[in-house]
Amino acid sequence: MVQRNRERRAAAAARRRAHRRACAQRAGGDSGTTGWGAAPSEAGPGRPKPSAETISTVLLSAAREHWAGHPEASSRIALIVADRCIDQPLIVAAAARCAVLALVTGAWERGWTPEDLQQIARRRLTTAGVSYLIDAIADESQHYAQATVAPRWREDLHHIGAGVWWKPDQTEGHLQQWSRRHHTGLADALMTVIEVLAMLLALPCLPSIVPPPGSVTVTANPCRGIDQKILARVRALLAKAESTTFPEEAEALTAKAQELMSRYSLELIMVESTVDAADPYPAAARRLWLDNPYVAAKAMLVAAVAAANRCRTVLSEKLGFTTVLGDEVDLEIVELLSTSLLVQATRAMLSTGSQVTRSGRSRTRSYRNSFLLAYATRVGERLSNARDAGTAAVAEAAQLLPVLAARERVVDELFESMFPQSVSRSFSVGNAAGWHAGRAAADLAILDTRRAVVSGGT
């Protein structure tokens, strides 16, 4: 038995060595003629220097190894490149830039946006990797005329902080300036590049929600949305709601926000319907990213807010976001309320502490999951009531019915075109105590800001 174990370990070690040799050979082709696959200590001064195109190919090869679950191989390749090209900083920087920017452009073609890339990077990369990717997005964005970049896209770039901070240099490229800024050596910087490349290679296709840059000519017409003065006041009130330690005050500040914003949306619809009731504005989509844990339960809360505002949602749990479809104004309302309610729900959930059974077994996870599901259910009920109150307060509300029906059809058509394979999902509650606590917390959630906004937010 001992002998067989030794033989198996020896065979496994031999396979690992063979795999590393194959990785190094794939990185540079025929290592016998170029010396590219040689270990750092074997790279002599007389060996030919690789081109930027060759280095880009090598980095992509390392990224594929990293993606396939062989980080040791990609780390070895990063060391080899750093050793061979230590005196070629501009060539290395150009090679890294070429490889990454091509995949960033490819991500736009697969339906990703700058905000999406930043969010997925936060979940899969180190802080350094996120920083490098945002720089790459800023660099890639320089290639487009402003007139061909949608306003939503420009907002994304501003939101993630994608701006060019580095300077063109005769002796250094972006990679070297980035390395100095992050106090890292060339090998570590190249490893970061490889990790970014590996993440970009693994991205799936997503339905397009914003036209990618360069694909359309954007008109100079202003974006349609909520009045910025209203938004500013509502955001200030919700910020107070999120910071207060008094549940009653929180409630007084968030069941009337829905009523206020519902009235605003419906009154806007009434105005717009007088222009052309038979031609409603096209529906749009937004992705709301949700942090672990309990992504599915948090998505239920977003779905409850969306349903109360004539929107539909689809959860992509593995990636960590839910897509909301609806009218642009309604989407603004859903994002604003969902963000505030998620903060309130998480704070209320965490305030209950850990949960254990009498035998000492932890029940915290099932309790918190049930808490959030109950919170979402109850909030949905309260939002629906507030929506109905807002509808009733609109003059000549009966005239809204055909307009709202037309808008619902537009949303349904977009939903079917973007998600033809979607399926419904049910959730089970595994902790009664968490369920009851969640409903109680939802009763205290702040949903109404109408009076405060009307009075100027005081």
Image (cartoon, rainbow, N blue to C red):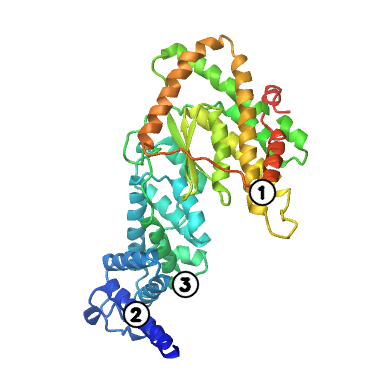
Q: Which mark is residue 136?
A: none
| Rendering quarter of residue 418 | top left
Does residue 440 appear in this view? yes
Measuring from the top left, give residue 323's x and y in whole percent.
47, 39
Q: Residues within 10 Å of mark 1 (few under 14, many from 20)?
A: many
Q: Nearer the viewer, residue 305 or 66?
A: 305
Q: To which residue does mark 3 refer? A: 185
Q: In percent of the image, x 69 and y 59: which residue is there?
A: 361
Task: Look at the numbered disc 3 and give the secondary structure of its residue.
Answer: loop
Q: What residue type is disc 1 on?
A: Tyr
Q: Quadrant of the C terminus?
A: top right
User: Helix, strand, or loop for circle 1?
Assistant: helix
Q: Amino acid at mark 3?
A: Gly
The residue sitting at the bottom extreme is 3
Viewer-proximal residue, 10 or 133?
A: 10
Residue linked to disc 1 = 367
On the rendered structure, is 435 left or right of 33? right
Mark 3 against mark 2, which lies toward the viewer? Answer: 2
List x then y, in percent, for residue 247. Answer: 76, 37
Judging by the rendered image, the residue that carries numbered circle 2 is: 15
Report how far apart the C-alphas of labels 3 and 2 lie in the structure.
31 Å
